[in-house]
Image (cartoon, coloured by chain):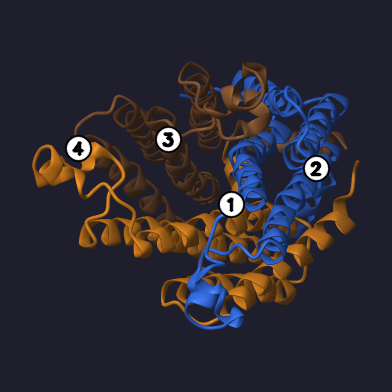
Chain colours: A brown, B blue, C orange
Amino acid sequence: RSGEMAKLTQLIDNEVFRAYATYATIVLLKMMLMSLITAYFRITRKAFVNPEDTASFGKGESAKKYLRTDPDVERVRRGHLNDLENIVPFLGIGLLYALSGPEVSTALLHFRIFTGARIAHTFAYLIPLPQPGRGLSWAVAYSVTISMAYKVLKTVLYL
Amino acid sequence: RSGEMAKLTQLIDNEVFRAYATYATIVLLKMMLMSLITAYFRITRKAFVNPEDTASFGKGESAKKYLRTDPDVERVRRGHLNDLENIVPFLGIGLLYALSGPEVSTALLHFRIFTGARIAHTFAYLIPLPQPGRGLSWAVAYSVTISMAYKVLKTVLYL
Amino acid sequence: RSGEMAKLTQLIDNEVFRAYATYATIVLLKMMLMSLITAYFRITRKAFVNPEDTASFGKGESAKKYLRTDPDVERVRRGHLNDLENIVPFLGIGLLYALSGPEVSTALLHFRIFTGARIAHTFAYLIPLPQPGRGLSWAVAYSVTISMAYKVLKTVLYL
C-alpha cells in the first residue's frame, strides 16, 4: 500500500499536473464566489425566488413583494451559468491535456491565460464593461480550451 | 500493457481514491435523479416548455395551454441548477484533493459530510423546509469544498 | 522526474483511458458548440439580454427593443443546459469507470453510445424532431451513465 501512495504522490508531484491542480482550483473557487455574490445581491436588493426565503420579512403580502427578479441578481446568475458552461470543459479537457504530456511552459501558458480570461470575464460581466470586453474575454478562454482539446485529440485519439 | 493496467488498478485500489469514486458517483446519481423528478412534475402538472412535448395532448389551443411554467417544476429545476453549481466544484476539487495524499479518515469525513449535506439540501429544497434548513445544508457542503481546496492549494501550489 | 513523466504517459497510453479522453473531449466540444449556436441566434434574431450587448444598435429605445427573448435562442439555451446536466455526470462517472478496469470493447460501447446519443439529442432538440426523438436520445445517454455508475460502485465501493 505504501507503493500505491507513492504513485499517487508522483502524479501530484508532476509539474504540469500541479499547475493544472492549482489553476483548476483557482477557477473553481472563482466560480463558487458567484454563489456568494448572488446571495449578497438577493439580500441587499431584497429579491428572492423561494417563498420560504422571505418568511423572515413577515407573512402574506408584506413578504410576497420580495418574490421578484432584480437586474443585478439576474446579471450575476448569468455570469455564474456562463462560468459553468466554460469552466466544465476546461476542467475535463484541461485534466486530459495535463496527462497528455505537454511542455510545462506551454501548459502554464494555457492555464494562466484561461484563468486570467475567466476572471476578466467576471469583471466585464459584473461592472459591466462595454462590449467587446466581455465577448473578448469569453473568446480567449474558449480558444485556450479548443487549443488544449486539439492537443488531447492529437495525442490520444482512439475512436 | 499488463504493467499499465496494473498501475491503473493501483490508482483505483487506493483507499482515498476509492472513497472519492464512491461519493462522487453517489452525489452525481443524486444530481441525475433531479432530471427524473423534473420529468415527473412536468407530466403530472402538465407543464411543458417545448411545443413538440405537448403534441400528444392534441393540436392547436388544446395543447398550447400546457406550455406553461409550474411552481413545482421550477423548484426542482432550481434545485438541479444549484446541484450543478456545487457538485461541479466538488468533482474537480475533490479529485485533486484525493490525489493530494490526505489521511483516509480526514478524506472520508469531507466526502461524507459533503454528500450528506447535498442530500439534505435536496430534501430542504423539495419539501420545502423552512429556512435556514436549505441555507445551512448549502453552507456545509460549500465549506467542505473550500476546506478541500485549501488542502489542494497548500499541497500543490504551482503558479 | 523522467520516472514521473513515464507514469503519466502510461496513464494516457492505456487504451480505455485513451478512449475516455477521446469521447470526453468530443462531447465537451459538442457542448461548447452550443455557445456558438446561441450567439448565432442572438445575433441573427437580434435578441439580447444584456443592455451593453445592444449598444451598437444605437441609444435608448432603438436599442432597448432588442432586449427580448426569442424562441430559437431559448431552445438552444435549454439544449445547452441539458448538456451540462448530462455531460457533467458522464465526465465524472466516465473517468472513474475508465479507471475501474473495464474491457476495452465494453468501455468503447459505453462511450460511443453516450456520445452518439448526445449528438442525436442536440439534433432532436434543435431541428426539432417530434417526440419521442429527443426523449429517447436523452434516455439512452442517461442509461449508459447509470450502467457505468453501477460498474464503478461495484468495483470501488468504499463508504
Which subunit holds the residue at mark 4?
Answer: A
Whether residue C12 can be seen here: no
Secondary structure under the numbered disc 3 in the rendered image: helix
Residue drawn at the location 37% of the way across and 55% of the way down: C35
Label 1 sits on residue? C9
Distance from Cα at disc 3 to Cα at disc 1: 44 Å
Q: Quadrant location of the C terminus of chain C?
A: top right
Label 3 sits on residue? A74
Label 4 sits on residue? A131
Which subunit holds the residue at mark 3?
Answer: A
Residue closest to the eye, B66 or C135: B66
Distance from Cα at disc 4 to Cα at disc 3: 18 Å
Single out the mark in the foreground, 2 or 3. 3
Distance from Cα at disc 4 to Cα at disc 1: 42 Å
Residue drawn at the location 70% of the way across and 59% of the way down: B41
Distance from Cα at disc 2 to Cα at disc 3: 32 Å
Whether labels 4 and 1 belong to a single chain: the reply is no
Left or right of residue A26: residue B30: right
Left or right of residue B61: residue C19: right
Say the numbered circle drawn on residue B23.
2
Residue closest to the eye, C115 or A13: C115
- Judge the density around disc 1: few (<14), some (14-19), many (≥20) Cα neighbours within 10 Å: some
Whether residue C28 can be seen here: yes
Single out the mark in the foreground, 4 or 3. 3
- Judge the density around disc 2: few (<14), some (14-19), many (≥20) Cα neighbours within 10 Å: many
